[in-house]
Image (cartoon, coloured by chain):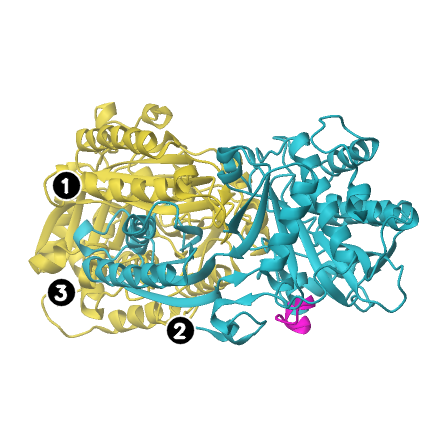
Chain colours: A cyan, B yellow
């Protein structure tokens, strides 16, 4: 089969091919952009460091014979057009990172995309692959959302579920808009985004399931149901020295009980079926000698089943009311960023299983707990999402790690997936969709409370 | 006696004298500088609003026949010199506030000082008071320490326990130095501070003891022992979505347990003998989808007895180690800002009791839980500190309140104290001192860890 030739016939052989070495050289080169002393990277969206790695991506794409276009939200597409007028198989991920983030999250997928696209191009040139679609490697703008919320911005605009103007006017904590940040890094594009036929993405797992099971490839069949709650705890400001304990209405103590309650709610569920977190927590007035008047915090609830998230939310709201009563404070909670379970097409999962077998490697089907650019893309075109193992399951931190061997295995399977997609294997497959909308792309849930 | 005439002979009479009305008019006028919608003020040290109320103070002092000088740390002295070359009885407090603070804290004492000084001047002019010392109303710079830490800055520099250059180079969270803030509000003075002979201050109690007992005047005989702990909770940054609960080392959950432990430690002590707080609490990286890697927080411990603070500190450090073990995080704690119990001179307490009796009002002796400018001043000259009731005991918040009647009663007693001090009643009294130094002013404890 065509894709086998493109991906190389030495599957199962630990020998590193020249194209693997080239990929690894490119990948490790990217770690210098925004490098942190502890071995991570800090490349928040629209910063100078982010601009530098994106310039490298454009130059490297040019060397590989691809032509580069940038759309209005700053997503960069490196195109190879064999079939004039035909839509594109998009293959991508993101080059931005969290503050003091890891060098694999997102970047691996973008560099692998470049090399999978180059391999497909070589296969077409050699007459080994008959393309039905064109292909493009994609660097989506602002997947992380650390500087500009919401996350997964470029792909959400592409998929039509986030308004371009709303995205461009989003501000960072200093009041800089996305539009200004794109201009300052030269990435405020004017090109139309290429029309997509299918989407593929590879990413580190950011969990331990592959590592524990010893399986090198994960194939994502669904995303977890997620939602956030903005919680405001309102007490009364007073003097840390002069105010007796009984006279206080301390917002920080009450908010600390909220954080503990958010963790404890998982005890009501089966192990590893739900995760809950508080990542953002702001104290007012935040002065050493003032009892805090208010804490605003963001609760993040994620589970494989929507019903578990709903149940956890209900339990938590009850416990918050108990804390408010006991501590004589007000607690307000507001739902936002509700993201229902998204199903990736079964045909795509099957295609990825074949591509793994072609390489002689095992694969396993799993859910993604984290959001990825593939999630919105899956709503408009059939999408395939692959995982490679993460050491210790850690991510969004500097000691994030995936071995060269695992990255190369992932690149080979991704290349197989891309060549199959280019050949039109999912041409008759519908895009995926959320559980709430019965499987088709549907925006209704985005208005949910 | 001279001071009786100066303070007026209508003690116990609810009739408001013309000078009381003038004082109340001045006091309520100051509330417009930095006024907040909820009835408080926001006049952090060195801001434009703070500069405006200080300009009012200078103008009003001029109208009252006082001459104004400003020292190098920006403290303003409104002087009346009857005895050339003699030292000064200083009477003061502070015009700066906490963010969204109350309009009484500090400001009442400064406006009362102006009017007590004017009354003493009238008594001297009328031949009713024979001054041994001169007098000055003082607005100390940066008592609150909300913008520039440490608090009680101007009086600590005056007392020689804080280095002037260190204070001037202190920065706010935006990197602005005290020197720059003083220049921008025109208060970087070049005048030498007047030499002090004694100090008097009146302040709202910021507690409920006077209100509960129905006594209108509190006389402070000591400050509580206080200390702070800078606590750093260090976990590991990870992804709120992808990282399973068991794989996390969440610094925020551990820090929340620390906040709860800080409150719970008071249960080991008699009611109302100790207060513990966390007012400052900073989360890193503070992103909604990142499990926090670090929290830095400030613990504030205050008790009437040093031994209670030491015991609370010991219990807390033990509990912190338990939290660190259970949560698999590191917790570091560092002592700072240790302030031993300071005793005000017994002769000064007796003098204030007499001044209260002169006005026909009851007084009670109590400790101050909060720090005040009188605490460092008491280390270099005999000092007298008075309290008036605070409604509900609240302070450092917008609903802080003291009635006009209580303020006027306080002004009358303060005026009596000032005239007695001007007459030289504490001329043979030593300054106060900390418990550790055996009663005399001593700086040794400031180096304590």
x, y percentage for residue B437?
25, 24
Query: Residue at the spot x=49%, y=38% of the render?
Result: A208
Q: Earlier in the sequence, mark 2 or mark 3?
A: 3
Q: Nearer the viewer, residue A331 or B446?
A: A331
Relative placement, left or right, of A338 versus A202 is left
**Which residue lies under the disc numbered 3?**
B9
x, y percentage for residue A281?
43, 53
x, y percentage for residue A245?
19, 50
Q: Which class describes the residues within 10 Å of circle 1: few (<14), some (14-19), or many (20+)?
A: few
Relative placement, left or right, of A342 versus B320 is right
**Vertical placement of residue B439 versus A272, above or below:** above
Number of the front mark, 1 or 3: 1
Relative placement, left or right, of B33 versus B387 is right
Relative placement, left or right, of B406 versus A148 is left
**Magenta span has A164?**
yes
Q: Which mark is residue B37?
A: 2
């Amino acid at each position: 089969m065509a894709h086998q030739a493109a991906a190389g016939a030495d599957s199962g052989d630990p020998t590193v091919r020249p194209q693997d070495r080239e990929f690894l050289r490119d990948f490790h080169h990217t770690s210098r952009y925004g490098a942190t002393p502890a071995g991570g990277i800090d490349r928040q969206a629209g910063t100078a460091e982010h601009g530098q790695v994106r310039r490298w991506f454009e130059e490297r794409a040019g060397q590989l014979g691809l032509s580069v276009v940038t759309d209005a939200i700053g997503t960069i597409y490196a195109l190879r057009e064999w079939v004039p007028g035909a839509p594109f198989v998009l293959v991508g991920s993101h080059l931005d990172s969290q503050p003091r983030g890891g060098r694999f999250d997102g970047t691996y997928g973008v560099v692998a995309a470049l090399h999978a696209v180059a391999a497909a191009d070589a296969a077409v040139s050699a007459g080994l692959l008959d393309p039905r679609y064109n292909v493009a490697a994609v660097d989506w703008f602002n997947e992380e959302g650390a500087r500009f919320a919401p996350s997964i911005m470029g792909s959400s605009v592409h998929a039509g579920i986030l308004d371009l103007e709303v995205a461009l006017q989003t501000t960072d904590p200093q009041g800089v808009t996305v539009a200004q940040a794109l201009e300052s890094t030269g990435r405020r594009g004017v090109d139309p985004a290429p029309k997509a036929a299918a989407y593929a993405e590879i990413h580190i797992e950011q969990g331990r399931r592959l590592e524990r099971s010893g399986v090198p490839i994960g194939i994502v069949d669904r995303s977890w149901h997620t939602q956030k709650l903005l919680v405001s705890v309102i007490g009364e400001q007073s003097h840390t020295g002069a105010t007796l304990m009984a006279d206080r209405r301390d917002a920080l103590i009450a908010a600390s009980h909220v954080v503990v309650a958010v963790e404890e709610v998982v005890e009501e569920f089966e192990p590893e079926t739900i995760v809950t977190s508080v990542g953002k927590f702001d104290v007012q007035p935040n002065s050493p000698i003032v009892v805090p008047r208010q804490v605003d915090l963001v609760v993040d609830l994620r589970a494989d089943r929507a019903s578990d998230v709903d149940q956890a939310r209900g339990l938590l709201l009850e416990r918050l009311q108990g804390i408010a009563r006991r501590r004589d404070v007000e607690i307000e909670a507001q739902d936002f960023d509700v993201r229902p379970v998204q199903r990736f097409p079964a045909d795509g999962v099957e295609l990825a299983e074949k591509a793994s077998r072609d390489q002689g490697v095992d694969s396993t089907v799993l859910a993604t707990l984290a959001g990825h650019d593939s999630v919105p893309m899956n709503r408009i075109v059939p999408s395939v999402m692959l995982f490679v193992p993460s050491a210790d399951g850690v991510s969004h931190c500097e000691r994030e790690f995936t071995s060269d061997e695992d990255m190369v295995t992932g690149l080979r399977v991704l290349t197989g997936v891309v060549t199959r997609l280019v050949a039109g294997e999912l041409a008759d497959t519908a895009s995926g969709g959320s559980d709430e909308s019965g499987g088709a792309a549907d925006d209704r849930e985005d208005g949910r409370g």
